[in-house]
Image (cartoon, rainbow, N blue to C red):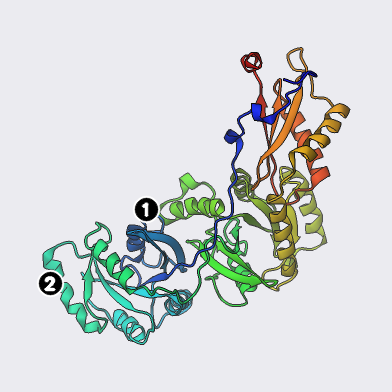
Amino acid sequence: MAGDGTWSDEGDWNLADFVTGGDEIEGEVLPVVAIVGRPNVGKSTLVNRILGRREAVVEDVPGVTRDRVSYKAEWTGRQFMVTDTGGWEPDAKGMGMAIATQAELAMRTADAIVVVVDATVGATATDEAVARVLRRSKAPVLLAANKVDSERMEAEAASLWSLGLGEPYTISAAHGRGTGDLLDRILEALPTSPREKFAVGGPRRVALVGKPNVGKSSLLNKLAGEERAVVDNVAGTTVDPVDEVIELAGKPWQFVDTAGLRRKVRHASGHEYYASLRTRSALDSAEVALLLIDASQPVTEQDLRVLSMIIDSGRALVVVFNKWDLVDEDRRHQLDNEIDRELARVPWARRVNISAMTGRSVQKLVPALESALESWDTRISTGQLNTWLKDIIAATPPPVRGGRQPRVMFATQAATRPPTFVLFTTGFLEAGYRRFLERKLREQFGFDGSPVRINVRVRDKRDRKKK
């Protein structure tokens, strides 16, 4: 302890407990394996088997997976991406046609393709149509005969040679039978140099989140300039997250278009339940969240639940009020009041008013994202922080607690992403005083678009005696 009663060296404290951030993951290039086939043959079950965890949505209903979704996988020490696709119907109409587009795109960009066929049914007309397309594919194609649970079924699967895709590899994705041999063959088929670069940790990662039918997929398509995500005017069209790397303002951005959250996860069932869980996972893997809110309708409890998830995740945040083309003067006045009342917890969040349908002001999203991420990455030096803190505390000391006034010895920034500060004190600081310090911290250093966390570490009497 220094002679003036303050702690002279921050080394007196263990900062490791407060470090919550991490360094940027170095980019790596991974080959891509596309899992394709007609609806309900077990593609998502096979993806889950490859991953070793329940990640892809599985339901005993055709058409549950509607978009192509990529996951990072590993087998015998080698990493690759697995792309799960919607069921491919060659003569599909409407929603089915959009699903087929996603599957075809996955086939064009994959380094290896696994076509899944239900061996208990045999080759259907759709399987034959898929095979005709795949026989023209430049990428290697493997035929997986799924749902083969016995040796008797293996003999029946031999009829799938007729598809002209080579030897059918008999597997049971549900039970794991034969999947290890299939994975060995997949690794043999993958080229040493991927056809397209799938950068992990390269582009800044953006999660598109919000309640169902607020326009997340429409915004993704507008930003991409093409139909990347399935859009239908039915709430909840997107079930799986869809990863897309889109170049905006000369830089790549990785967007994840997530499933709309239902009112209560515990009230959801089947694939909706797992989609809700993965929406949380999408936030965890992102760096910044774009929260879409329907500006033409009152802010709802669902909107606020999604907001709470973002706050808990510690991600940078841009609040996007979509469908602004439907907002009249009266609605603008109502919305201002709702923002003051309902979004009071995030006065620091950047706000952008857009119309994903018309493209109004979507160009304002990139500056807002960049500003929020810059704040999320900001680090304040210990010297600068404590000089500022000394003046603030001198002008407004902490409130007295239990007859004693706690003293703040010094502060340090323990982490970025989000900025996390630790105050070392002789007593507990009231929540109201911590909010006051956060407000002053933002006034001095900015942090627009990023949460700021302030932890208090109280030095107890036993620690003092040791010194």
Relative placement, left or right, of 60 versus 68 is left
Q: In x, y percent, where is residue 358? A: 70, 74
Q: Decide: is 415 above or below 123.
A: above
Relative placement, left or right, of 200 versus 185 is right
Relative placement, left or right, of 219 versus 109 is right
Q: In x, y percent, where is residue 396? A: 85, 28
> Crowding near pointer 2: few (<14 within 10 Å), some, many (20+)?
few
Q: In x, y percent, where is residue 195? A: 46, 77
Q: Residue at 36% of width from left, 85% of height from top?
A: 133
Label 1: state its secondary structure.
Answer: loop
Q: Closer to the camera, 142 or 380? A: 380
Q: Residue under circle 2?
A: 155
Mark in front: 2 vs 1: 1
Label 2: state its secondary structure.
Answer: helix
Residue type at mark 2 is Ala
Query: Where is the C terminus found, in terms of image quarters?
Result: top right
Rendered image: mark on residue 53: 1
Residue type at mark 1 is Arg
Q: Residue at 48% of width from left, 53% of height from top?
A: 278
Q: Closer to the camera, 23 or 273? A: 23
Rendered image: mark on residue 374: none
Q: In x, y percent, where is residue 204? A: 61, 61
Whether residue 281 is visible to the viewer of this picture, yes or no, is: yes
Whether residue 59 is visible to the viewer of this picture, yes or no, is: no
Specify which label sits upstream in the sequence, 2 or 1: 1
Q: Decide: is 225 above or below 271.
A: below
Q: Closer to the camera, 234 or 118? A: 118
